[in-house]
Image (spheres, rainbow, N blue to C red):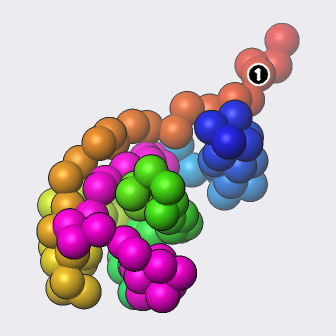
């Protein structure tokens, strides 16, 4: 699963060509209980400035948000989650690295 997510993020970054993409992973409180909870988060967060992709995992109780760091930040995304009723704890916030090989 993690390998698939990494491949998806790398493909997304290559397609967009942005070097400022970051992936924020948070745990929501209250916990997500069902598909409706996941859909609430996905449908609201996708409209936040700079958000490129939102994925949720009921099993791990995590929300993964790929965003453009020039257009938003961790605090802004946490505030957006709070607006829809979820406090969040940051698990990680990492830059998406480019996989392009240098031309010789």
- Specify whether 90 is left or right of 52: left
Is residue 29 in view? Answer: yes
Q: Is residue 36 magenta?
A: yes
Residue under numbered circle 1: 101
Q: Position of residue 34 (x, y in %)?
A: 47, 79
Q: Position of residue 7 (x, y in %)?
A: 73, 40
Residue at the image point whose x is 42% and y is 82% from the top: 37
Image quarter hosting the C terminus: top right
- Specify whether 73 is left or right of 33: left
Q: Which residues are magenta?
A: 20-42
Give the answer, above or below, for where 85 lies relative to 70. Answer: below
Residue at the image point whose x is 69% and y is 29% from the top: 99
Residue at the image point whose x is 29% and y is 42% from the top: 91
Q: Label 1, secondary structure: give it.
A: loop
Name the image quarter holding residue 80: bottom left
Image quarter hosting the N terminus: top right
Q: Nearer the viewer, residue 33 or 55?
A: 33
Q: Is residue 82 magenta?
A: no
Residue at the image point whose x is 71% and y is 49% from the top: 8
Q: Position of residue 81 (x, y in %)?
A: 25, 75
Q: Position of residue 78 (x, y in %)?
A: 20, 66
Is residue 76 in view? Answer: no
């Amino acid at each position: 699963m993690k390998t698939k997510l990494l491949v998806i993020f790398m493909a997304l970054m290559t397609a967009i060509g942005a070097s400022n993409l970051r992936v924020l992973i948070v745990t929501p409180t209250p916990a997500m209980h069902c598909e409706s909870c996941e859909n609430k988060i996905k449908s609201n967060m996708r409209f936040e400035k700079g958000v490129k992709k939102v994925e949720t995992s009921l099993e791990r109780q995590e929300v993964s948000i790929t965003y453009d760091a020039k257009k938003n930040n961790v605090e802004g995304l946490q505030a957006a989650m709070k607006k829809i009723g979820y406090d969040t704890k940051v698990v990680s916030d990492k830059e998406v690295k480019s996989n392009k090989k240098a031309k010789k």
